[in-house]
Image (cartoon, rainbow, N blue to C red):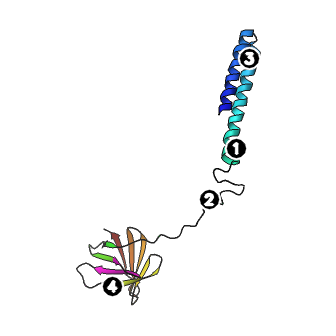
Amino acid sequence: MKSSKYIAFAALVLVTSSAHAGDSASAFKALFSAIAQVAAQQQAGHGGGRHGGHEDGYHEGGYQQAGYYEEGPVIYNISGSWGMRSGKVNRFQKSYDGYYVIPVGRGKGVHYVEIGENLYQDANSSGTYEVVDRDYMVWRSNDKRNLVIELFRQ
């Protein structure tokens, strides 16, 4: 950046000295050549600093050494109360290998074991919870009735 300031200053000195001498054509020629030189240096400085140096971690092959990793699936924490469209509520409590699901005011709870990513099944395989996102899940019966119940986080 300092060199571009010096070149601009030198161009200004050349223009003013040439103008005093009465040769305005050479003054403009000197001015335009100085401006072109400054522009070329700045463009080379921006391009060289971005791709020529190693301060960004950029190498010929790209950003291979930048700590690249693959992102795995998101496993949602579903602890808390979940409501159905009918107004019924289930409460989920985390256990060592899944969740204990307690229907609020409607009987005793059932233990659901994790069988996959965001997928939980009860011990006798009568139903499966599939967590779609952090605020929505679906319960499906594993029998010929094939019931589907949507639950929403409260």
Earlier residue among tags 3 and 2: 3
Query: Do the CB atoms of the residues marked 4 and 1 lie less than 8 Å apart?
Result: no
Q: Which mark is residue 66?
A: 2
Residue range (magenta): 93-108
Q: Give the secondary structure at mark 1.
A: helix
Earlier residue among tags 2 and 4: 2
Q: Residue at x 66, y 46 (%)?
A: 50
CA neighbours of label 2 inside 10 A, class few (<14), some (14 to 19), many (20+): few
Distance from disc 4 to disc 1, alpha carbons, whole Å, reads 64 Å
Q: Is residue 147 left or right of residue 105?
A: right
Q: In the rendered structure, does residue 8 fall within the stretch colored magenta? A: no
CA neighbours of label 4 inside 10 A, class few (<14), some (14 to 19), many (20+): some
Residue 108 point in image, percent of width and height: 27, 85
Earlier residue among tags 1 and 2: 1
Amino acid under disc 3: Ala
Quadrant in which the C terminus appears = bottom left
Residue placed most toward the observer, 154 or 19: 19
Amino acid under disc 1: Gly
Residue 103 point in image, percent of width and height: 28, 80
Distance from disc 1 to disc 2, alpha carbons, whole Å, reads 20 Å
Amino acid under disc 2: Ala
Q: Which mark is residue 27?
A: 3
Amino acid under disc 4: Val
User: Which residue is label 4 attached to?
Assistant: 110
Distance from disc 3 to disc 4, alpha carbons, whole Å, reads 91 Å
Distance from disc 3 to disc 2, alpha carbons, whole Å, reads 50 Å
Name the outermost residue toward the bottom: 124
**The quadrant where residue 5 appears:** top right
Mark nearer the viewer, 3 or 4:
3
Earlier residue among tags 3 and 4: 3
Distance from disc 2 to disc 4, alpha carbons, whole Å, reads 46 Å
Above-or-below relation of 119 to 32 = below
